Amino acid sequence: MLVNFSFKNFRSFRNEMTLSMEATSIQELSDSVVASNGVELLPVAVLYGANSSGKSNVLKALKAMRDVLLTSVKLNPKERLDAEPFSLDLTSMDEPTSFEIQFTLNGSKFRYGFDYTSESIMAEWLYEKRQGEREFELFLRSGNEFKISKTRFAEGIGKQEATPPNRLFVSLVAQLNGKVAQSILDWFSNIEYMSGMDGKGYAGKTLRTIFYHKAGKDDIVNLLHQTNLGFDSIQVSMKEDSVDSKTVHNIFDNEGNVVGQKEFPTDKMESEGTKKMIEIAGPIVDAIRLGQTLIVDELDAKLHPFLTRKIISMFMDKGFNKKGAQLIFATHDTNLLNIQYLRRDQIWFTEKDKTDSTELYSLVEFRDEAGNKVRNDRNIEKDYINGRYGAIPFMS
C-alpha cells in the first residue's frame, strides 16, 4: 500500500510537497484505517482546490513517476526522458525533478526515489525496512557512481556498468531477473490513473471484463446494481475488435409488475452519468479485487454526489475492500467535506502562492491565524466555501 509520495520541481510545484496516506491519531472513522506492515494507512485521499490550483498535478506527478519507471526499459541510450519541471522562475527549468515514494510490500516498507532531467538520471535510491529492523540501504546512485548492498540487493551487483545515463537502475535489474527490483516494478504497475472527464478509454476494459470473465462480470454488475442506475443488467457483444453494450430494462404492467424486458443501446439511450459509471466500474472493481491504487482526476464529473459517496464508501469498508486498495482523487464536490464520509487527514488542499507555485496541505495539519487546528465538530463544507482553508477561487 502507498504510505506517502513526495515530489519537487514538477509542473506547478516548485518546492517539495508530500501527499501522505498515513493515518494520524484522530479517531473519526477509525474502522476504515488499514494496518499494513506496522503502518496505519488510509484507503482514500481527496484533493480540493480552485481550477488551475495544481490539484490535478499532484495526481499527474504520481503518474509521471510510474511512467518514467515503467517506460525506462524501452529507452535507447540517447533518448530523452519525459520531464516537466516548474517553468515560472529563472532556475527551476535547469534543475532536476525529484520523486520519492514509500510503500508496503511483502512484509517490508520500501522507500524508492530518483532525481532526473530530460537527459539523464541524476540520482536514484532504494531503501527497505523490515518489521522490527532499522531501514537498510539497498542501493544508492549518484550520477554514474553506485553503492550497492551485497547482502540486501545482491541482484544488482555488477549491473551498474550496463546502466546508461537515461535508464533507471531498478528497471534494468528487473529486466535481468532481479526479484526485488521486479517486485518494485510490479507494485508500480498496480497504480491505475484515469481522468474522470473522459472515461471512454476505460469503457472497453469494463465491457471486455464483463464479456470474458464471469467473476469480474458479477462484481461489476453487483456494483452497478448498488448504484440504482435504472437498468436490470447489461449485455455485451463482441464484433472483431469492437465491443458494444446494451442495458436491459424491465417492462411493467399497469400495476407495476414486471412483465418483460427491453434492451437499449448504452451509448444512445443512457445518460452521461450512467455511461460514466459503467466506464469506471471496471477500474473500481479491479482496484478493490487486486488491491491496487486507483487515481482519478475529477471523479465526480457527471456523477450525482450520492454515486461519488458510494464509491468512496466501498474503499472505506474493510469488509468489502479486503486487499487494501486505495483511492486518490480530485474533486469539486463539497458534499464530501463531512467527517461522516471522510477523516480530516484524508482531505487535502492545493493553492498557489504569489509566485504561482502550488502548495499542498491537509485539513488535519491546517492551523488558523490563531494557531488552532480544525476541530472535528466544525462545519467543514461551510468553512471551505467561506474560504477558511484557502484553496478556493477568488473572483474580481
Image (cartoon, grey):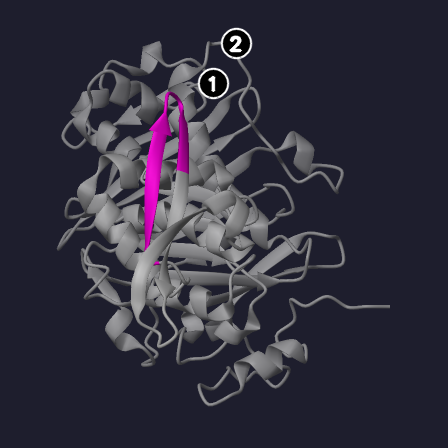
Please tell me the numbered disc located at residue 78: 2
Q: Secondary structure at mark 2?
A: loop
Observer-nearest of 242 and 337: 242
First along the sequence among labels 1 and 2: 2
On whether residue 322 falls in the magenta region, the answer is no
Q: Which residue is mark 1?
A: 166
On whether residue 235 falls in the magenta region, the answer is yes
Q: Which residues are magenta?
A: 232-244
Tag 2: residue type?
Answer: Lys
- Please, what is the dominant secondary structure of the magenta stretch? strand
| 105 to the left or right of 223 | left
Q: Residue at x 33, y 23 (%)?
A: 171
Where residue 33 sits: x, y (%)? 27, 68
Where residue 383 sits: x, y (%)? 61, 82
Q: Is residue 48 above or below residue 211?
A: below
| 101 to the left or right of 1 | right
Q: Are marks 1 and 2 in contact (CB under 8 Å)?
A: yes
Observer-nearest of 34 and 99: 34
Please count the marks in the image: 2
